[in-house]
Amino acid sequence: MQLRTLAHLGDSRGKRVLLRVDWNVPMERSRIVDDTKIRLSLPTLAALRASGAAVIVVSHLREGATGDTLAPAVRAAGRLLGGRRPTLVRTAVGSPTLLRVCRALRPGAVLVLENIRRYPGEERNERAFARTLAALADVYVNDAFAACHRRHASVAAVADYLPAVAGLLLQREVEVLQRVLEQPAHPMIALMGGAKIATKAPVIDRLRRSASAVLLGGGLANTVWAVRGYGIGASLVDSDAAPVVRQLLRARRHGAVRMPVDVVVGDPSARGRGHRVVPVGPRPHVICERPEAVLDIGPATIRAYSAELRTAATMVWNGPMGWLECSPFHYGSVMLARVIASRASGRAFGVVGGGETLAALQQTQMAQYIDHVSSGGGAMLAFLGGEALPGLLPLYRTGA
Ligand code: ADP
Ligand code: MG
């Protein structure tokens, strides 16, 4: 199976392209806090314009986002593109006016539709809505890797009504993550932390087949301890994940999944004032009691995990090792982020993804050394967990 890409589009001159991007940027009021997602979408947008296509941009904004309008994103895209600002149209999808506007687009023009989640048909993946959307264009380009795990109309159903290909960002994501799954440079070490073990367990499971070690931390490690009968006080745990954890514990017997050997505990309500390091033994014991909680990995674990990461030819990291938002419990995550960034771009191939994981990486000011910073948190996990992503399936050509 081969991913269809821009190269398969043929001559785009005079064609109207429906381009799905992810401009769901973090905002405070109507100020964009981080424009990375917009920047990442520009190469495809530029390539399409240069080929003489007119582009109709589609993106979602998460619920509750300021005014749920894409206006700030469109302004930012205009600044980044330099020169002509894309036009945000407020005319409803399905109106004859919009159809007329789209048909009249000149080569190189860029039109942006308002937040696609304003339409109830989007999240329901309604075929009628997808068909209406598709009627605006001649071809469909999906460059929103971060949305590909969602069965939504502008990602999934729309591709049934137009020739569909992957944009440059999406193509790179698939190529890199596929390589990590199928032919990584060995040894591969995966570092996994964060909150939701249920979404991460399939990834741990899949990676440990080819990884020489999967290093656990954060809420993931807490949940494993809770299931095994350790006392962990008020620690963050994913209480729904017991069955998944049992499966992981079986994996542990293979020796591929490693647990922290010490942790930093503290009272979360003290917000960083007062904390101590506690060793963690191989047999269940009380690590801490309420109101204390396990809030970070400890120094011995940082040392051990760093040593493992230094043996790797491929490093994959998702999920903070501790309470990232509260100093000093960000320490374990940031230390290991530095180790990964120091080894990446040369000695090892480094892949990092996840919302809070990227926030930890930013704190190191070394993100530029990471070989591949994934634009998709949930989508990356779904892909690495071996799921078939609803947004990717239609982009594959069978046979040839
Ligand atoms: P990502 O978005 O990078 O995949 P997650 O969403 O799974 O990461 O989890 C990140 C969150 O988990 C962060 O807000 C972090 O503070 C929290 N976290 C991780 N470990 C702990 C811990 N031991 N105690 C409290 N919070 C934790
Ligand atoms: Mg997150």
Image (cartoon, rainbow, N blue to C red):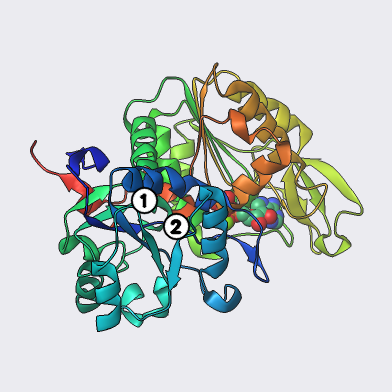
Q: In the shown orientation, is residue 27 left or right of residue 141?
A: right
Look at 65% across and 46% down and name the residue there: 284
Relative to 274, say whether 6 is above or below.
above
| Mark 1, secondary structure of its residue | loop
| Residue 391 image point, x, y percent | 29, 56
Q: Residue furthest left?
A: 399
| Mark 2, secondary structure of its residue | loop
| Residue 138 image point, x, y percent | 19, 59
Relative to 61, say whether 120 is above or below.
below
- Hey, which quadrant is residue 97 in on the image? bottom left
Q: Quadrant of ligand 2?
A: bottom right
Q: In the shown orientation, is residue 89 left or right of residue 236?
A: left
Nearer to us in this view, 284 or 257: 257
Which residue type carries mark 2?
Asp
Quarter of the figure with the N terminus: top left
Q: In the shown orientation, is residue 331 left or right of residue 117?
A: right
Look at 74% across and 60% down and name the residue there: 233
> Mark 1 near mark 2, Cβ–Cβ under 8 Å?
yes
Specify whether residue 364 is in view.
yes
The residue that label 1 is drawn on is 143
The residue that label 2 is drawn on is 22
- Hey, which quadrant is residue 44 in on the image? top left
Nearer to us in this view, 295 or 176: 176
> 10 Å neighbourhood of mark 1: few (<14), some, or many (≥20)?
many
Specify whether residue 280 is in view.
no
Quarter of the figure with the C terminus: top left
User: Which callout, 1 or 2, points at the residue further toward the start of the chain?
Assistant: 2
| Residue 343 image point, x, y percent | 60, 21
Which residue type carries mark 1?
Asp
